[in-house]
Amino acid sequence: QVQLVETGGGLVQAGGSLRLSCAASGRFFSSYGMGWFRQAPGKERDFVAGITTSGINTYYSDSVKDRFTISRDNAKNTVSLQMGSLKPEDTAVYFCAAKSRGGRYFAKELYDYWGQGTQVTVSS
């Protein structure tokens, strides 16, 4: 069992930056691939970024590539999402998730555990 808690959301102006963190409790955090997803009102939950167990490989959606950076610290059981050059269309609830299975990081159905989400609002 893994419990995930996201922090760091808030209100920021367009062009600004924000850093989200996700703290994991439970055993074997380093054996889980981690992902960040987001969901805007009335829309599907979409993949944002993913990172492999070792942190060597990262994946991004086209909409955030070159603006967002995912990282993890297995010693501290945390995964982070550094967001820059924020746009109003980045406004959403952001979720972190953990998966033990292989497969594509953008596939939300492969994730076993989810956090409760944190709101990010980007004003124009």
Image: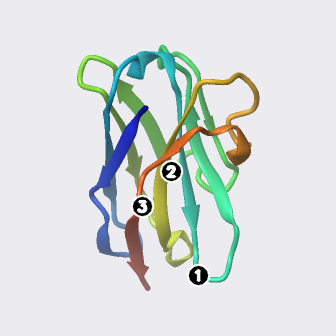
Q: Mark 1 or mark 2: which is in front? A: 1
- Ranked by sequence position, the earlier of labels 2 and 3 is 2
Q: Label 1, label 2: how many angstroms apart (C-alpha)? A: 22 Å
- Ranked by sequence position, the earlier of labels 1 and 2 is 1
Q: Say which residue appears at 40% left-offset and 22% top-offset.
A: 29
Q: Label 2, label 3: how many angstroms apart (C-alpha)? A: 20 Å
User: Is residue 1 placed above or below 56 in the rendered structure?
Assistant: below
User: Is residue 104 placed above or below 11 in the rendered structure?
Assistant: above
Residue occupied by mark 1: 41
SS category of the residue bearing label 3? loop
Q: Is residue 80 left or right of residue 104?
A: left
Q: Amino acid at mark 3?
A: Gly
Q: Amino acid at mark 1?
A: Pro
Its colouring scheme is rainbow
Q: Is residue 95 left or right of residue 65?
A: left
Q: Position of residue 78 (x, y in %)?
A: 31, 33
SS category of the residue bearing label 1? loop
Residue occupied by mark 3: 117
Label ID, residue 67 = 2
Quadrant, the N terminus: top left
Q: Label 3, label 1: how many angstroms apart (C-alpha)? A: 13 Å
The crowd level at tag 3 (other Cα within 10 Å; few <14, some 14-19, many 20+) is: many
Q: Position of residue 10 (x, y in %)?
A: 29, 71
Q: Amino acid at mark 2?
A: Arg
User: Is residue 50 placed above or below 21 in the rendered structure?
Assistant: above
Identify the residue at the far front of this view: 1
Q: Say which residue appears at 39% left-offset and 70% top-offset.
A: 120
